[in-house]
Amino acid sequence: MNEIRIFSPATVANVSCGFDVLGFCLDTIGDEMVVRKTKEKGVSISKIIGSDLPYDIQKNVAGVSALALYDDAKPNFGFDIEIYKHIKPGSGIGSSAASASGSVFAINELLGRPYSKTQLTHFAMKGEAIASGSEHADNIAPTIFGGFTLIKNTSPIKVLQLPTPDELYAIIIHPQIEIKTSLARAILPNSIPLKDAITQWSNLGSLVHALHTNDYDLLGNSLEDVIIEPHRSELIPHFQMVKKEVLNNGALGCGISGSGPSIFSLCKGVKNAKQVKNAINNSYLKTEVSFEIHLSKINTEGIKIL
C-alpha cells in the first residue's frame, strides 16, 4: 500500500472531572487526511484544506508528530501529507489531536503497523505540544484507541481503555469563537483547596466505576467539575444557560469540552439525545452568538481507514 485516506475523529477531553487524564471519542465530527509514500526521504505537507495552518513541518502538529515517528522508524523513503480540516482549531474538540494522531496512524499503516497504539500516542504527543505548550494525551488517546480512555502516565505513556455503555450519546455545541488552549490553561489556579480535590477525585473514581457497571445514574452524578469549570466557563458565552437547559431536559450531565468553547452533554438513548439537542439549539438561537451543534454516538473504534 502506497497511499491511505483516513478519518481522524474529534474528541472530548477532561469529561468534567478528569482534567488532563480522561477523554472520549466522537463519531460524526472529524478531519480527513491522505498520506502517501514518496521517493524523496523526509516528511512534507502538500495540501491543507479548511484551515489556515502552516505547511512548515516543524510548525504543524501533524508534521511534528509524523517527524517524530519518521526519525524513529528511519525508512528509506518519505511521506507526503494532505490535511482536510473539518474540526476548527480552538474549538475544544481536539482539532490539533486529530491532526497529530492522524498523521502517525496513517504512516504506521503504510509501514505495516510496526508501532503499537501506545507508541503512536507517544509520537502524537510531540505534535500536540506545539498547539498547547505541553505534552498531554487526553485528546490523543481516545482518537487513537477509541471510546473512553484514561491516561495513567505520560512519561512513559500508559493509556487505559475504559468500557463504553451502549446507549451513551453525546451532544456538542460549538459557539463560533476560538479559545486557545494556552490561554485556557493560563487562567487556572496553581493551587486548590483540599476539599475540592477530594470532591474531584471522588467524581473521577465514580465515573470510571459507572462506565464499568453501565450505571447511567452514577455517571450523571459524577459529571461535576469543581476545579476547572468555574474558571473556564467565564470564557464561554451562555455556558450556564446551556447547562440549565441540558439538565432540565433529562441529560445525564454537561461540561466544558477540553479548553472550550465547545460544551458537551451526555445522554442515555438517542431519543433523549435528540430532545436535548433540540432544546440547546432553540435556546442558543436566541443569543447573538453563531454556533454549530452535533449529535454523536461514542466512537469505540477511533481513527478509521476510508
Image (tube, rainbow, N blue to C red):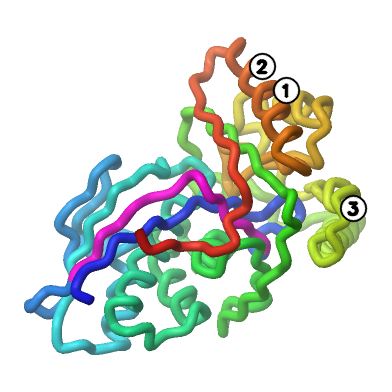
Q: Which residue is mark 3?
A: 218
- Amino acid type, label 1: Met
- Amino acid type, label 2: Ser
Please tell me the numbered disc located at residue 241.
1
Residue at 71% x, 68% y is 162
Distance from the alpha carbon under mark 1 to that under mark 2: 8 Å
Asked which quadrant contains residue 78, the reply is: bottom left
Q: Is residue 253 above or below residue 147?
A: above
Tag 1 and tag 2, C-beta contact below 8 Å: yes
**Left or right side of 156 for 90:** left
Give the foreground label among 1 and 3.
3
Q: Which residues are magenta?
A: 22-36
Distance from the alpha carbon under mark 1 to that under mark 3: 23 Å
Residue at 19% x, 68% y is 36
**Residue projecting furthest to the top:** 286
Q: Which residue is mark 2?
A: 283
Picture coordinates of residue 4, whole percent (x, y): 27, 66
**Left or right side of 289 for 21:** right
Picture coordinates of residue 71, whole percent (x, y): 27, 84
Q: Say whether residue 160 is visible.
A: yes
Q: Is residue 74 above or below residue 6?
A: below
**Left or right side of 301 for 256:** right
